[in-house]
Amino acid sequence: MNDSNSTLLEPDASAILSPRFVTAGPLLIAGLREPLDANAAQKIPQLWQELIACWDDIPQRVGAADYGLCIRLNDHEYYYMAGCSVWDFTGLPDKFSPFIIPSQTYAVFNHVGSVQFICKTVEAIFDQWLPRSAYLHQAPRENALHFFERYGEQFDPITGEGDIEIWLPVIPNRLI
C-alpha cells in the first residue's frame, strides 16, 4: 500500500487537536469489561458484540449513546469496558460491571474516520495535544477513569464511523 492511500484512512490531525471543554458527570455506566493486554485489538470488538447481544438484559438503560471506558487499575494495568448509561445499578445482572464516570472537566475530541483508527486519535491526544496544551491529564488513581469514548446517535456500527468522541479528564496547568 502506498502512503497516499493510507493517509486517507487516518484521522485528520486538525480535528483531533481542537477539543471543546465540558464539565459533566457523574454518569453511571453498566457494561462488560476485559483487561487491556496484547490481544486488546481482538478483544474489544468481541466485547462490543457481546454487549450488543445482551442489550435487553439492561432494563435501566437511558439515552442512545454508548461508552468505551479505559480504566486504570494500578501503575501499568488497565481494563476496557464497553457499556451504556443507566439510571441506577439496582438489579443489574451479575455479568455487568458498574462504573461511575466522575463529575469533572473534560477535553472532548472528535474522532474522524473509522473506529479501527481510534488508537491513533488517542495517541495524538496524549503525545501531541496534551504536552502542548495548558492542561494536565487528571491524574488517575487506582481503579480510576483514564479516558472514555462516546459513541453518539449518529455512530454507524456497520461502517464503524460517525459521532465518535474521546473524553479526556483534565485540570488546568497552574504552572503555565
Image (cartoon, helix red, strand yellow):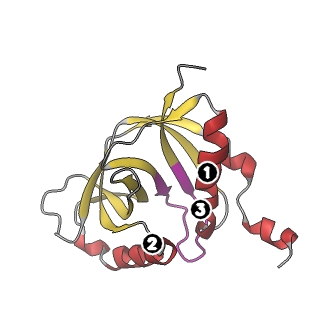
Residue 118: mark: 3
Residue 162 in sight from this viewpoint: no
Query: 152 or 12: which is nearer to us?
Result: 12
Quarter containing the C terminus: top right
Is the residue 60 above or below the residue 157 in the image? above
Would you say the residues marked 3 and 2 are in contact, meaning their CB atoms lie under 8 Å apart? Answer: no
Badge 1: residue crowd in 10 Å (few <14, some 14–19, many ≥20): many
Q: Amino acid at mark 2?
A: Ile
Spatial CA span between label 3 and label 1: 10 Å
Our reading of the magenta stretch's main secondary structure is loop
Say what secondary structure mark 3 lies in: helix
Region rendered in magenta: 148-166
Task: Inspect the magenta stretch and tell me whether residue 165 lies in it.
Answer: yes
Determine the secondary structure under disc 1: strand
Name, please, the residue furthest toward the left: 91
Distance of label 3 from label 2 (alpha carbons) = 12 Å
* Image quadrant containing the N terminus: bottom right
The tag earlier along the polypeptide, 3 or 1, is 1
The residue carrying mark 2 is 44
Circle 1 is placed at which residue position? 110
Residue under the image location 39 percent in, 74 percent down? 47
Sequence order check, earlier mark of 3 and 2: 2
Q: Amino acid at mark 1?
A: Asn
The local crowd at label 2, few if under 14, some if 14 to 19, many if 20 or more residues have their Cα within 10 Å, is some
Q: Is 48 rendered above or below residue 65?
A: below
Q: Residue at 41%, 55% (x, y): give it.
A: 76
In the picture, measured across the screen, residue 40 lies left or right of residue 84, that is right
Q: Name the foreground residue: 91 vs 64.
A: 91
- Image position of 14 with respect to 10: above or below: above
Disc ID at residue 75: none
Element under label 2? helix
Q: Position of residue 72 (x, y in %)?
A: 37, 52
